Amino acid sequence: MTASALTQPGERERFAVKLKSIDWTFSLALAAIAVAGGAMLFSIDGVKWAPWAAPHLALFAACFLAMIVLATVDLRIWFALAYPIYAAGLALLAAVAVIGRSSNGAKRWLDLGPLHIQPSEIVKVGLVLALARFYHVRSAKTAHLSWRLLIPAFLIGAPAALVARQPDLGTAVLIAATGGAMMVLAGLSLRIIVLGLAGLAAAIPAAFLFVLKGYQKARLLSFSHPEADRSGSGWHIIQSEIALGSGGLLGKGFGLGTQSALNFLPEKQTDFIFASLAEEFGFIGCATVLLLYATVIFIGFRIAATAHSHFGRLAAAGVTSTFALCVLINGAMVMGLAPVVGVPMPLLSYGGTVMISMMVGFGLVLAVRVHRYSEVGSGRSGLL
Amino acid sequence: MTRPNIVFDEVNERQGVFHRRAFLLGGGTGLGLLALAGRLAQLQLLQSGRYRLLSEKNEFEFRLTAPPRGLILDRDGVVLASNRPDFRLLASRDEHTDIEDLIARLGDLVPLDDVRKRRLAADLAAAPRRAPVTVTEDMTWEEFARVNVRAPELPGVTADMGELRVYPFGGAFAHVVGYVSKVTAADVTKTGPNSDPILLNPGFRIGKQGIEKSYDLELRGKPGGEKVEVDVKGRVIRNDPAGNLPSTPGETLRLTLDADVQNRALEVFGDDSGAAVMMDCRSGDLLCLFSAPSFDANAFVKGLTGAEYRALAEFQMKPLLNKAITATYPPGSTFKTMVALAALDKGIDPNRTYYCGGVWFWGGRAWHCDKAHGVQNMEQGIANSCDIFFYQTALSVGPDPIAAVAREFGLGKTFDIGIPGQKPGLIPDTAYKRRAFPHDPVWHPGETPSMGIGQGYVNVNALQLCVQVSRLANARVAVRPRLVHSVGDVVQPSGAAAPLLSVNPQHLQFVRAAMASVVTSGTAAQTAQLGLGPVMMAGKTGTAQAHAYKSGHGEHGAVGAWAERDHAWFIAFAPYDDPRYAVSVLVEHGGFGAEAAAPKARELMRVVLLKDPQVRARIVQPMPAAPPPTPALDQPSHPSDAAASEPT
């Protein structure tokens, strides 16, 4: 083992030491984003705590504690649970397709007694863990190019396909992109990457013609020409840009955003919360929040880079990639640079399940940080 | 020793690949975030002005507010048309509205019958998105309060307070003042004043008849605007009073009419059909312009049902027709004043006599008179309205001089009194025959006797006859009628500013004296006495044939079927010795002028004379000087003083 000479054997296993080695800048940045989200949720519905601001902040507080606790969980335990978590997520996802609850024409929810679960969120974390475990025991050569890569391709493809069927195009894209990013990080052959990107470019028009549903097509089309249907599918983009642009440098002021208060901004508490923020706090507020996101992403990748175990590296990088993709996709969507797909702005948007999965992911990232010097055994010998 | 799964150098290799690629991925993410920041800068810093405007356009709506319509007053300031509050319910639709469901729920709020529901559905479907449509108007305060509480439950439904035109005298002024009613699609034009978007405001009304129509723009005023903050559904969140633009009320219109005379006309006509026109013969101001039977103009403001409208339109007495100016009738014997003037002007001796034996044979046929008047000179001919005298007088004058005098006195003319619908009637002469009868362009001598008694081709309206008698009474100026005294502060030109009459004043005096005899000893001696002491009226009766009396149809006077009876006329002026007021009364199919028309003229004349202080001074004997009021009598009129003084 590579224990540092400065530490006594077993010293790193002490809880207080683990707490100390948590990255508090990272955690504070997360908290700052969530508080900004709480403030916006407080503002956009008549400056009151109900129905969004209070639950948002309360859930974040609980998730934050859970994240700290998860950060102290040994990486070997994460490693051992990787496949089970993934398998459970995939099974629940399959169950949704059969017995899921429909809401707004999409089957995304599973009602298990008092619990309402969105299995696509469990799969997000499970996929990162499963891929990290898969590559942990594979050589660079295997990761570069071999028939074994069909396994990660299946691990990614199965949940992505199930989620796309719900239909939840945004999350499906997110899952596929996260998995792809991890394969690339693990060392996928450049030739395959180029071929894959080219195939993707070729598949988009085909998917547009044969796979996408009517409203999905309308969203994509209105992205390129929002003015063509002002009151219909172009509405989201136009109103979002008005909210952003009218904010100006300093914004209209807290609680004074008219686009959100008068409901011109659709889905103002979830997908378009960033537009509300932009309207009330202007460029200064937006740049500050983007800086917080950049901080989280930078530290996330740094934690990945400093981990000694390949499992830790890939797991931290995978979670961070998911987070970064969410921010980029939602940001681009709100600013009219990408079609409207249902991807929320992580921690800023209202939405319990997404926040839980994100914070569990960050628990994993911090666990990688806390256990950065630990080696994870290969295969079944990992634990104990 | 088992070989580890991954040998050491391979571990280093995959770590290296990871580091390189993580660096690239992180860098890519950073670039992505920078791109977002750049887009934000573009939207929020460079284009923020444009988006700020768009945001305000989203937030605020400028809603037109209808201006209060100008008042219409009589000559004393009595209100003839004003506005009252109107509690109404409006509904609008947007792209998500289920119209049938909306109407069903509105039906729970206010009573709506099936006809109204169908009309409302059509209105809503035709209206632009978010443009309010009137659901119901004129709710009681209780209904309004109830609806106002519940309306916010229904998106797009609002209760508000508008204004509704009200005509306090109902029927008396319906023809002359006219009415406003709802704007129809045909009223809205692409350009001009009726392209104003205020016309599309729910409940907005424009003038459709009479003064309301011809002075619509002056009365309408200028619409204002209300700046309101609306949400995405168009519901008003709050008003911004600072951004309101006040509306400009319409001009007040003062008419020359006298409400007392006009209302008296409504009373005296009762169930009769006809018209009454009164003028101040010195100024030309119209004091009365009445048509009977009338209708309630307020009903048109609310809108008539098809059945109600048909009932009005199909009634044989034609209540919707303004008989004072639009319908023309033969003037009958009132025209003899014109024939007499033409004869005098031609130098015919007024003392020349004709014998009336009740019938006169000329040109191969018998010409009848009411009765055998015996020997008649001109004054007797007018006083007794002897047809046989005027058949022969007309023949000796000829049609053209008679027509010239009639035209100088306003017959066959229309006057600019500011309301539409005047018919000129016809004063025939030889030129007319040449023009109108290309196959028989000759004036036959046999047509002249009929003209001499105001029959044949001669057709006039009641306003023209009033002008005629006004000019006879004025004796100097060819006064013109004036109906609108002032628009806002702008006083309209007086009717007295007119050319002088070219008729010899002595001849006029002769005709006036003969008209006085009509009332004192002639045809109207029983029915046209004012009973106002020294103030006397002078007049002329007319009984005009509406049908040829043949094969049992009709008979002189008020007998037979209503539509075949004679028209009764009476024209008059008073006081005889100091002419101030002139009147013409037509009773359609009323029979004899002296019996049907003269009493009505007398009543109208009494009202206006008794309102005139100078005339009143001649009639009313001064009271003996009253003793000064005593303090004892004064005391009880101040009960508070009395109460205060009680304890002492």
Image: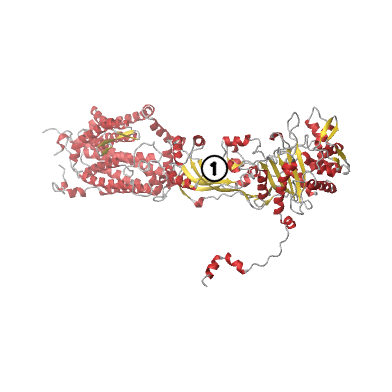
Residue A155 location (% of width, % of height):
25, 31
Image spot of residue B247 (x, y percent)? 56, 49
Left of B618 or right of it: where is B70? left
Left-right relation of A52 to B390: left
Residue B117 vertical position relative to residue A262 in the rendered view, above or below: above
Q: Inspect this view and state whether residue B48 appears.
A: no
Decide which of B461, A79 is in the foreground and name it: B461
Depth check, front residue: B455 or B595: B595
Q: Where is residue B280 in the image (x, y as percent from the top left)?
A: 73, 50
Q: Can residue A177 be seen in this view?
A: yes
Colour mapping used in the image: secondary structure
Nearest the eye: A156 or B413: B413
Residue that mark 1 sits on: B203
Which SS class for mark 1?
Answer: loop
Q: Number of marks in the image?
A: 1
The amino acid type of the residue labelled 1 equals Gly
Q: Quadrant of residue A136?
A: top left
Between A6 and B189, the one lying in front of the other is B189
Q: Which residue appears at 78% of the width and 40% of the height?
A: B333
Chain ID, mark 1: B
Give the quadrant of the N terminus of chain B.
top left
Q: Where is residue A38 in the image (x, y as percent from the top left)?
A: 33, 48
Lateral position of residue B127 relative to residue B284, left or right = left
Q: Which residue is at the far bottom?
A: B648
Residue density around tag 1, few if under 14, some if 14–19, many if 20 or more, within 10 Å: many
